[in-house]
Amino acid sequence: MNVKLFAKKMSIPEDFSKVADAKLKKLDRFFGDNADATVKLTPQKDVVTLEISVKHDSMIFRAEQTSEDKYDALDAAVDKIMRQIRKNKTRLEKRLRSTAFDVNATETNNIEEDEFNVIRRKKFFLAPMDVEEAILQMNLLGHQFFMFRDAHTDEINVVYKRADGNYAVIEPE
């Protein structure tokens, strides 16, 4: 697994880099060598927010953790990604390494799997609009997200409201 560390407004100590690399090596049994992991550290007053993103093929696993100690945040974020993988074990078995879920390789946890019950399908015309118009339309509808066709690029985008009250746009590559 290729690991990259980034920090905003702080430096990354050498020993943290080694510890992060060792912790993320735990995930090698799921992904192998062809995965890319990004660790971002952001200080905020008395705490540090650590975000881990692991990209494997077309799948992205993400965990964010805030703690007073960056090492505690790292442990919790790695554990969170491992819980995500175990919870969705049967859905992920086809996409991850064939030896990822060997009985000897992972401890057995009895985590209930949620079924994905699609209860409704909706089709609608995607009118070309800019981001501001899409946000306005989303707010008028009272939705948390809104899919639209960007008037400038003609690509399908999604705008959504973040937990912090700001807005974000998802664009295809």
Image (spheres, rainbow, N blue to C red):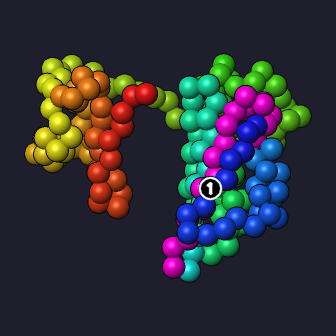
Residue farthest to the right, as pictured: 104
Q: At 66% from the left edge and 19% from the top edge, which residue is drawn?
A: 94
* Mark 1 residue element: strand
Q: Residues within 10 Å of mark 1 (few under 14, many from 20)?
A: some
* Residue 61 placement (x, y as % from top left): 59, 40
Percent of width and height locating residue 71:
72, 66
Magenta region includes residue 33:
yes
Q: Tell me the quarter of the picture where residue 131 sits.
A: top left
Residue 144 shows in the view: yes
Tell whether 88 sits left or right of 123: right
Which quadrant is the C terminus positioned in? top left
Q: Residue furthest left?
A: 140
Residue found farthest to the bottom: 46
In-image side of 14 versus 168 (left or right): right
Corner quadrant of residue 148: top left
Above or below — where is 21 with respect to 165?
A: above
Q: Which residues are magenta?
A: 26-45
Where's residue 26, x and y in %?
80, 44
Asked whether 52 or 42 is in front, the reply is 42
Q: Residue at 75%, 24% (x, y): give it.
A: 97
- Quarter of the image holding residue 48? bottom right
Front-lying residue, 149 or 122:
149
Inspect this view and state whether residue 141 appears. Answer: no
Q: Position of residue 144 (x, y in %)?
A: 26, 45
Q: Residue at x 32, y 41 (%)?
A: 169
Q: Amino acid at mark 1?
A: Phe
State whether residue 161 is above or below residue 128.
below
Image position of 65 with respect to 105: above or below: below
Q: What residue sits 82% from the left and 64% below the top? A: 15
* Residue ID for mark 1: 6
Q: How many marks?
A: 1
Tell me, yes or no, whether the highlighted magenta stretch contains residue 21: no
